[in-house]
Image: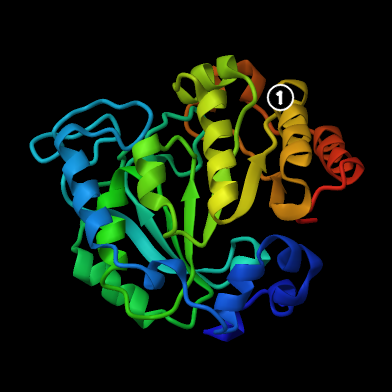
């Protein structure tokens, strides 16, 4: 498997950004510490998580449906449903190779979603079991982490916690999320996740409502970043959208610099493409310009951010 490592990932654990922002993750990979989920009994958390399914409030939509009987806004019911699970080598260098589990469903309706077939259920997915997922993770113990993503992992939180109490190998966990988790979910995740990999999209609630169909985005995402920063290690992704530098990219980077400094890693992503329903919105119907990308990168340098170049 290791022959699939990208050249820039081989010595990345010795890099300054990893040593500054991900020291504990590094220690787990060097077998000097245990992953967080192995350090505690998850039985009570699993019990509380499954109980929430009776009136679901796992994300901040809080649709309160009984997911044992019907599906929530995310269209996830009472069983874990995945799209795929494989060794991913396209993630951030310090995460490669990552055993990545793509769950079906999402709490957002992003108009430009690049995984829209998964997030919006244009494919059926595969119903699986907690034990099967745990065994897959055990079999991939040589990966640098197990990466829970989607879609969005939040609706699948009870199953994920149940999975982790059946995992036997010392492997770091990555929570790869849009960060719209409720406080109930945040409390369940506390002291379980090693690295939070967030997708910070907007600084403007109007942009979030129009392009992802969510309310109170900024307040919730800021709150959740502040909470996880106190609990675990963090990598923040920011996808540069065309025509959104001033309203979103610039203030997000400024906030990260002011609030977290070099203690988080930020990946300023330039691979936006107009997928799904992006053509319906004139501001995001094209690609970001080279000038927009360079402005984002220049600002990251000026702010002295710990960013992936």
Is residue 239 found left or right of 80 in the rendered image? right
Foreground residue among 305 and 43: 43
State the quadrant of the C terminus.
bottom right
Can residue 77 be seen in the rendering of this structure? no
Name of the residue lying farthest toward the top = 206
Residue closer to the observer: 94 or 40:
40
Q: Which colour scheme is used?
A: rainbow
Quadrant in which residue 302 is drawn? top right
Mark count:
1
What residue sits 57% from the left and 83% below the top? Answer: 32
Residue marked by disc 1? 244
In the depicted structure, whether residue 242 falls above or below residue 170: above
**Above or below, 210 relative to 187:** above
Residue 146 locus on image (x, y percent): 44, 67
Q: Residues within 10 Å of mark 1 (few under 14, many from 20)?
A: some
Image position, residue 237 (x, y; %): 63, 46
Question: At 64% from the left edge and 61% from the top edge, which residue is drawn?
Answer: 92
Please state the horizontal and vertical placement of residue 259, each as a whole percent of the image.
72, 39
Label 1 residue SS: loop
Q: Can residue 169 be seen here?
A: yes
In-front residue for pair 149/252: 252
Is 4 positioned to the left or the right of 159 in the image? Answer: right
Between residue 253 and residue 294, name the one nearer to us: 253
Q: Left or right: where does residue 308 sit relative to residue 30?
A: right
Residue located at (31% from left, 38% from top)? 58
Q: Where is residue 69 in the image (x, y as percent from the top left)?
A: 8, 36
Drawn side of residue 165 relative to residue 2, left or right: left
Residue drawn at 69 percent across, 26 percent down: 248
């Amino acid at each position: 498997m290791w022959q699939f490592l990208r050249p820039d990932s081989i010595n990345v654990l010795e890099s300054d950004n990893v040593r500054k922002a991900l020291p504990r993750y590094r220690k787990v990979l060097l077998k000097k510490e245990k992953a967080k989920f192995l350090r505690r009994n998850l039985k009570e958390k699993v019990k509380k998580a499954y109980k929430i399914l009776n009136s679901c409030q796992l994300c901040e939509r809080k649709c309160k449906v009984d997911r044992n009987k019907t599906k929530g806004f995310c269209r996830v019911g009472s069983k874990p449903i995945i799209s795929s699970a494989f060794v991913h080598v396209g993630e951030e260098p310090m995460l490669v190779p990552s055993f990545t589990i793509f769950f079906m469903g999402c709490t957002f309706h992003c108009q430009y979603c690049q995984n829209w077939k998964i997030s919006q259920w244009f494919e059926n997915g595969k119903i699986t079991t907690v034990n099967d997922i745990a065994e897959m993770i055990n079999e991939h113990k040589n990966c640098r982490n197990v990466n829970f993503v989607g879609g969005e992992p939040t609706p699948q939180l009870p199953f994920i916690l149940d999975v982790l109490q059946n995992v036997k190998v010392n492997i770091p966990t990555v929570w790869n999320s849009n960060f719209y988790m409720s406080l109930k979910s945040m409390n369940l995740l506390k002291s379980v996740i090693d690295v939070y990999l967030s997708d910070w999209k907007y600084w403007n609630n109007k942009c979030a409502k129009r392009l992802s169909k969510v309310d109170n985005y900024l307040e919730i995402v800021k709150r959740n970043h502040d909470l996880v920063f106190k609990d675990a290690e963090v990598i923040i992704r920011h996808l540069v959208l065309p025509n959104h530098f001033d309203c979103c990219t610039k203030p997000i980077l400024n906030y990260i610099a002011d609030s977290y400094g070099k203690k988080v890693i930020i990946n300023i992503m330039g691979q936006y493409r107009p997928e799904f329903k992006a053509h319906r919105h004139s501001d995001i119907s094209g690609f970001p310009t080279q000038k927009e990308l360079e402005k984002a990168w220049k600002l990251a340098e000026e702010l002295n951010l710990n960013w992936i170049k």
